[in-house]
Each structure stands twice: as structure tokens, then as C-alpha cells.
Image (cartoon, rainbow, N blue to C red):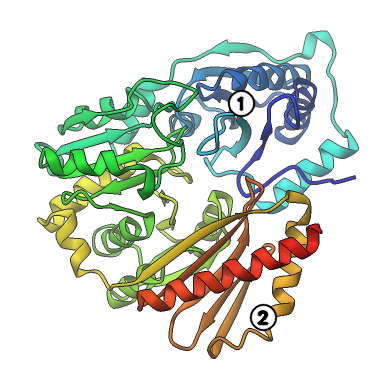
Amino acid sequence: MNRKLFGTSGIRGLINVRITPEFSAKLGLTAAAFYGQGSTIIVARDHRPHAQVVEMSLISGLLAGGVNVLEAGVTPTPAVLWSISELDADGAIICTGSHTPPEIVGILFFKRDTSELDRNEELLFEDLFFSERYRRVPWNEVGNFEYVEIEEIYIEKVLSKVRLSHIDGKTVVVDPGNGATSGVLKNIIELAGAEVVAINDVPDPRFPRRDPFPRPQNLKKLGRLVRGINADLGVASDGDGDRAIFAGDDGQVYWGDISGAMFAIDAIKNRGTRRIVVTINTSSIVEIVARELGGAVYYCDVGPPAIASKMKEIGAGFGLEESGKYVWSDAIFYGDAALATLRMLEFLGNENKSFSEIVRELPKRYLMKTVINCPDEIKGSVAREIEKSIENLNIKPIRQVIRIHNGFKIMFDDNSWILFRPSGTEPKFRIHAESSDQKDAEELLRFGEHLVTRIIKNLTT
């Protein structure tokens, strides 16, 4: 039996295939045992209709296990996390597909400190689940159920974390992508004092205008609009509001490495931290700018649980993932598109420069990415075959090999690198390559793509 539930972040799958009502109710019972009878848990969901199926089943399991439930309904994921302390909850469970395709649903488990379960806690949860070491309580011990409204808490908490004087008068284009932040993201930025133009701002679980995963390739309209109206900034979020991908005033849309480098500068110069955590797939541009300012970068595995764990381990004030997740220790241990947008505007105000001006001052690096379809059941075998191939690469001298969960980052003497990593949320294998020379980065990526494609073909024929 496969005794694994969690991927990179939470538990995800197809509704009524992997994520069934019965499975979800069992997760609820397991969560009741994990958090403890008598605990209070906030439960919420995104706007995908099948998320409600999962949420209701989860709630039944939680109540049956003696846990009290505060139901927040359809809301952005970070809004729930900001509310944990305010509502004196012991954690939160959110049913969301996040950035994944519309048919996917997921379940994210959070602790009182707003971070996801770390790997050891995931293992404990999985052991409780598969061994069925949970309890159905008697009728007079079932949990209490209550509806709660958290939007006002969310708005107040986020606005308290920025200097509004640095934001007043800025112009921002927002693209929630028809996700759960529709309306909410615009509202928060307007309340901070900025002028806001919104597109794709109506919740629609079909995500008809663009993929729920914000990336430069599907945000060209955002970039054109930012440049067309002379806005200071554009921002796009994902399905549940934890990711923020920015468009500069020149209309260019950038991966989170660029904005992450800006936030690293801000953290070191203005927020009193020298330690920055980055995921293994992040561009070395962050390390370069941090080092120039006297800071230090620490690498971790991909995903918010790994970022939060590393930040807490070393006392870092800021962490990031290149997909657009930015985490500050003085806020929540998770990404928040609203907070990221306001802090980016605050940073631009501090620097008294435009987004594009700051980008031009950053070191030039070329980061290339691709994904290859890969069945979940052979990901481990693919990784093992890649590891066997490392010794015989013969591309250029290898300086270091950093091993992560089922993946590898190969760093070369000339500071270029290539990363092989199985996706934790989708049946895909990801390859990233970076160099100070664009042609070199492209060649590294092609090499990686050919290698992984060949291995997958050999394993499936």
C-alpha cells in the first residue's frame, strides 16, 4: 500500500477519483486526532464547486472526532491564516486547488503559527490515517459548528503591516484570474490608497480567461494594460491568493526571482534581517544581491512547508519561491498576494524608483524552465536514473550537487546550474537551467529535457 498522502504542499487530486467524500471524511477524523479533541479549527474553501464536497466531508469527520469547526466559506487562503490568532483557533484546513487546473482539488493543513505541517508532522498524520488511529466520539462530545466572517480581519491585518503613506497615489492593475481573490485583492489595495484597475475580477471556477497558475506567458494582457495606462505596477494572483507575479511599469512580466530579489533587498535594508531563505529552484540573482548587502541565502526544498521550516530553523525574516510566493516572519508563514503587492509598492516608494529602473540595476541572469509529462508512479525511478547519469554528464566541470526530495541541482564551476525535480502536485517532471549567458542556459535546458524524455520513454516502453 502507498502510505503517502502529502505532496509538495498539502494533499491534491481529482474529485471523486482520489479525493472522494469517504476519503475526505477520513481525513477529517485523522485531523481531529492530530489536532486533538476539543481543538478549534477554521475550515474554508476556494470557489471550485467540488471544493465544497470535500469541505463538507472534512467537517463531518472533524465534528465526529470531537473538534470544533469555524466555517469561513469561500475565501482566499491567506485570509484564513491571518484569522487564526484573532479567532483563537488551533489551526486551519483549506480546501483549494490553488494554482492547479480547474478539475483538481486539494486540502491544506495549517498549524496555529500559520505554517503548514512540516515533513515530520506529515509523516505522523499519514501514520494516523493509514493505521486508523483516530476516534469517533460519543454523541455528547461531538464538536461545535459555527459560521464566521473573516474578510474584515484579513483587510485590517494586511493594512497594518505596511506604511500607507508610501502607497498613496500609486496606480496598480490587478488580475485575480477569476480566482478566490476576485474583488478582495482590489478592495485591499484601494483601501491602502492606490488607484486600481482590475481584470478577470469575477470568481469563475472554470478560469475562462487564463490558467489559474500566473506566469509570464499567460499574463501578456496584464503587461500591456500596465504599460498602456502608465501604471506603477501590475499583479496577478493564483486561484486562492497566495502567489503574486508582478508586471513592471514597462509592461514586462517577471517570475518571482526578480521580485524576490527586490524583496530581499528590502528585507536587508529596511526590515532588519540578514538571513534569506530561497527554494532550490530560485535564481541565484537573489543570492548575489543579498551577498552584496551583507546578507546570506539559505536553500531549502520546494514548497511553503519547506520555506517556513527553514525560516524558523535559522531565524530568517524573509523567504521566497520563484513561483511568486513570498513569506515574511512578521506576517504569516505563507504567501499572500495582497501583502506582497502592498510591500512591493512600499519598497518602490522607499527607493523612489520605478520597478523597471530597479530591474535594470539587478545582475543579469537567464533562467529557463520546462516541464515534461511524467506519471506519478515512475517519478522516483526517473530521479534515480538521473542520479546515475550525473557522474557521466561531461557537460562542464561540476562544483556541487545539491540533493533535495527526489531531485537534484547540479551547480557548475562557471556558476551556471541545472535542476531536475519531480512536481509534488502534478504528474510532471520539472527542469530549470540558469546561466549568465542565454545560449548556455538554453543548451543546458535542452540537455536536461532530452535526458528526462529519454529516461521516461525507457521506463514506459
Amino acid type for the residue under numbered disc 2: Ile
* For residue 403, side relative to residue 194 (left or right): right
Give the image quarter of residue 294. Answer: bottom left
What mark, if any, has residue 273 been given in the picture? none
Using the image as rendered, state which of residue 415 and residue 444 is in the foreground.
Answer: 444
- Mark 2: few, some, or many residues within 10 Å (few <14, many ≥20)? few
Q: Residue at x 20, y 28 (%)?
A: 190
Q: Residue at x 46, y 23 (%)?
A: 75
Q: Looking at the image, is 120 positioned above or below residue 244?
A: below
Residue 229 x, y percent position in the rendering: 11, 37
Residue 291 x, y percent position in the rendering: 34, 76
* Label 2 element class: helix
Q: Which residue is tagged 1?
A: 41
What mark, if any, has residue 390 been given in the picture? 2
Q: Residue at x 62, y 33 (%)?
A: 106
Q: Looking at the image, is 191 positioned above or below residue 268?
A: above
* For residue 209, side relative to residue 341 (left or right): right
Using the image as rendered, state which of residue 151 and residue 417 is in the foreground.
Answer: 417
Looking at this rendering, what residue extends furthest in the front direction? 461
- Mark 1: few, some, or many residues within 10 Å (few <14, many ≥20)? many
Give the image quarter of residue 295. Answer: bottom left
Using the image as rendered, state which of residue 442 and residue 387 is in the foreground.
Answer: 442
- The mark lying in front, picked from 1 and 2, is 2
Looking at this rendering, what residue extends furthest in the bottom direction? 397
Using the image as rendered, state which of residue 194 and residue 239 is in the foreground.
Answer: 239
Label 1 – label 2 distance at C-alpha: 46 Å
Residue 195 x, y percent position in the rendering: 14, 31
Residue 84 x, y percent position in the rendering: 50, 31
